[in-house]
Amino acid sequence: MAIPLSAAAAAAATTVAEKMKIHLPLHVGYATRGEATEALHLALLRSAGSDCKIDSGRSGKDRVTLRCPSSMKPVKGARAKWRALDLGDFACPQKEGEGYIAHRNRRMVELEEFAESQGHCGFKAVLVRGGSCDGGGAGGGGGSCGDSEPTWYFKIMDSGLNFKMHSDDCIVVGKATGRVARCLVKASAKADPSLSCASAIINITGDDSQMSIAMMPSKASMYRAMNKIKWEGEAFYEENWARLEVYLRDLRKLNNNVHVVLEKDEDNHFER
Ligand SMILES: [Zn+2]
């Protein structure tokens, strides 16, 4: 969904928490988990220049846990694993009379605290499907909160925020890619279709933005993102764009008397 953004409010926000509140408002529902995670990526980039990664081990069909990329260990041929699971000195035995779910939730809270005490970044956001799920607790409890329509919400933490921010010494830097990059250039490209990539980058990295040029996608990706936005009404744009070069080559091969020139610049962009 589109989040109404007041330019004045964005300029007045100084702390990361204030900026996050503008870019990722509390109690906002998203139609799909993809849309919600995209909103979090965007908000983190704009507010803190940082990023997040899905912890698949603690995510299911009704719940998605997102952590700091630095706390996720890449695993060859499999999904990244939460580094806290490799901490050998952690123990949290089940108390007498404590139920399975109560123990699991308490263990999760304690493991997160332990991981932080061992120097791991504690960033966390939890997406829950169904209902507004304002309940506290950081555990990995049940999924759906009711019978309301399937909508994804960021769970409100005990702090009253819908995320737990990166540690002060966390050096994770975000990078805009794919749909997130397209969202970033969308406003600029729509307002001025003749805008160059360089101007769009200045628009995005200027003002109160926490984004640096290093966080922007490559020029080629920006160019494609901007064109996709300009032409997004055309259902077959991507497909036709990809076919253009092949078509011109075939045209030249089949028509000896036709002079076909395909001009591309050094970034593999067609000259028009
Ligand atoms: Zn972090």
Image (tube, rainbow, N blue to C red):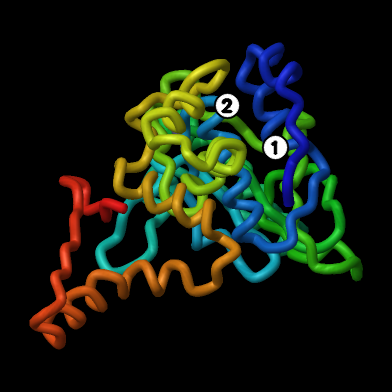
**Left or right, 96 with reference to 251:** right
Residue at mark 2: 47
Residue 113: percent from the left, percent from the top? 56, 35
Residue 222: percent from the left, percent from the top? 38, 44
In the image, residue 227 sits, relative to residue 185, either above or below, namely below
State if disc 1 and disc 2 touch (CB < 8 Å): yes
Residue 111: percent from the left, percent from the top? 54, 43
| Quarter of the image where one finds residue 125 | top right
In the image, residue 22 sits, relative to residue 55, either above or below, namely above
Q: Seen from this angle, which residue lies furthest left?
A: 256
Amino acid type at circle 2 is Ser
Q: Secondary structure at mark 1?
A: loop
**Left or right, 223 with reference to 237:** left
If you read the primary sequence from the N terminus, does the residue marked by circle 2 or circle 1 appear first? 1
The one of 10 and 86 positioned closer to us in this rendering? 10
* Residue at image point 77% right, 37% down: 4
Mark 1 closeness class: few <14, some 14–19, many ≥20 residues within 10 Å:
many
Residue 258: percent from the left, percent from the top? 15, 76
Residue at mark 1: 24
